[in-house]
Image (spheres, coloured by chain):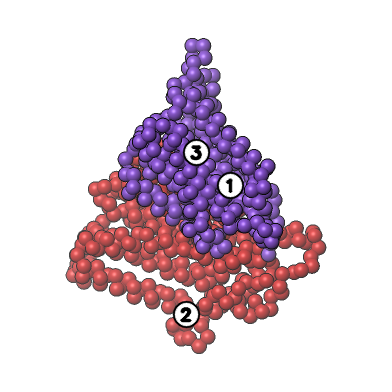
Amino acid sequence: MTVEAGSTDTKTTSAEGAVKRPGGGLLGSTFLRHAGLMLLAYVGILLLLQVIDPFRGSQLGEMAYFIPAVAGLTVLTGLNGQISLGHGALMAVGAYTTALMLDEREGPPYLLVVLLSVLTTVALGALVGAAAARLHGPYLAGATLALAVGLPGLALTFEETLGGEQGLQVRPPRASDGLESFVEDTIGWELRTQTYLAYIGWALALLVLFLLSNLVVSRYGRTWRAVRDDEVAASSPASTWAARASSPSSSARRAPAWPARSSPSSRGSRLRRRSRSCCRSACSSASSSAGSAASSGASWAAPCSSSCAPRSPTSAGAPV
Amino acid sequence: VQQFVNITLNGVTVGFIYAAFALCLVLIFRATRIVNFGQGAQAMFTTFIALEVLQRTESYWLALLAALVSGFVLGGVIERLIIRPVENGPEINAVIVTLGLFVGLIALAAIVFGNAFEGFQAPFGVRGIEVGDATIALTPNNIYNVLAVLIAMALLLALFRFTSLGLQMRASAFGQEVARLLGVRVGRMLTLGWALAGMFGSLAGILIAGGSFISPNFMDGVVVFGFVAAVLGGLDSFVGAVVGGLVLGLTTNYVQGYVGQELQTLAALAILMAVLLVKPGGLFSSSVARRV
């Protein structure tokens, strides 16, 4: 009973840091391959945004807002097998944090705001993850559902800061004058607010996809898949070791199967260790997916200029 | 003191309705290991049917009968047509399917019955009973709600305890293969379980609707609270569901009365997390060995 080595499609040597495919040149590096693909996609989107009219551009930007959340949910539910109905709540936290910080006239620059709200939500996600890692299946679904339904209550309670049912008005971030004139002078593109937000939204969405896709083929991704496939087997000492070892294919062969004979005392300690390592993995995936949900929320909060961003706490925290 | 008594009485009434709802979830979970997120939407749908009957015939009891029958049929049909294909797949598939059921039924109800709020008249008075010179929040309708849930529970218990059908249902929930070997039509029992849960859910739906307004979304809150109540009780135990429902009903009412209505759901979340962190399988869970 060992980690399913075949589930990773690239052979990685993460222990050394350099990730190489046997026989591959520059394209063999997962990092570079993903980075190249994302850059290519971004250039394509920038060009597309020039061709289509501004309204379609803002629609394209809206598409970008949901990508991080969906990607994060894919990692959490699809790869790690932890069901979450509470991602709307995490998006809401990201959105509200962004909205609060953008509210001040002399607030920090937009990207810093996004970074801060991502960090806030990661902290919350880690907290939720630490609690949720003890649960599985329907219990986890219940807890996250309660989170999604319960959290908007905060916005109603602190109505003065968080706006209650009406939500918050959000000042859309603008490109600084320097950047605007620089882009206009060098490339000749006009930076409207809507297109500017689409640029930023897609940049962030692709950045999240890039980070997650690297994470997924890494040691963590392997551990997550192992936990999804069989929690008990994944946390057995042999497979924990196998997942960390340099090459999964060879170590899986060498790794001893589930120890059949073990004394009761050693079994107890192993059980404890086992549940801890599973928890850690579930928690880490929860927080990484929380981060991406937050950036979703952050870019979601930004664009609506006259209307309010999280339209109402309930719509921001809608579970599905 | 009067406020405390009123809040407690309200909490018990609400708690019994949550408990009824949690019981449906437990009923289905025990039989098929699936949490039916569509339960609330099913109940909403049958309540709308009951409202139609109520408006046509002016008889509450005919409406109740219509709700129960349609709940029974709807539950059975959903199990047979929609759930059966995903029953043996991975856990997540079934959860997503029932979530889809939840969203789909609400949309369907909005198309068929409209999106407006419609009044649903209560079968009994909604004025509090007067004790001395104070009015306490115990209305005849509340008493009817509690009694209806209690009677339904007793009937359900009798079915499971004393009839051959109940024994067959318990057997197929306990061990499908063994039950099948012993001649139980397991598939039929599962359909029956869902149908019974649908019927019970529609009872909860019509009780909540009595004396208030219904709309395609009116069960959303109850779904969450019923679910939390079931999880509190361990999802596996009927007693647990009742206790969970009562605990939840009382706590949310105390929070609503003394702290603020907005924090009601957050309080439910807090209780849930507190209980699950101490006992990850709920209050009344029996410890289960995990197999490799």
Task: Respond whether the residues carrying marks 2 and 3 are from the same subunit.
Answer: no
- CB of mark 3 within 8 Å of CB of mark 1? no
Going by the numbered disc 2, the residue's amino acid type is: Ser
Task: Give the left or right position of residue B8, taking residue A208 as reference.
Answer: right
Task: Single out the mark in the foreground, 1 or 2.
Answer: 1
**Which residue lies at the image location 51% right of the left edge and 52% below the top edge?**
B76
Res B160 → quadrant: top right
Separation of disc 1 and disc 2 at Cα? 51 Å
- The residue indicated by pointer 1 is B26
Chain that is red in the image: A
Q: Which image quarter holds the N terminus of chain B?
A: top right
Q: Earlier in the sequence, mark 3 or mark 1?
A: 1
x, y percent for residue B218: 41, 40
Task: Give the left or right position of residue A134, taking residue B40 as reference.
Answer: right
* Residue nearer the viewer, A252 or A288: A252
Going by the numbered disc 3, the residue's amino acid type is: Ala
Q: Colour in which chain B is shown?
A: purple
- The residue indicated by pointer 2 is A29
Chain to which the residue tagged by mark 3 belongs? B
Numbered disc 3: secondary structure: helix
Query: 10 Å neighbourhood of mark 2: few (<14), some, or many (≥20)?
Result: some
* Residue nearer the viewer, B179 or A1: B179
- The residue indicated by pointer 3 is B204
Identify the residue at the far top of this view.
Answer: B133
Query: 10 Å neighbourhood of mark 3: few (<14), some, or many (≥20)?
Result: many
Going by the numbered disc 1, the residue's amino acid type is: Val
Separation of disc 3 and disc 1 at Cα? 14 Å
Q: Is residue B285 visible?
A: no
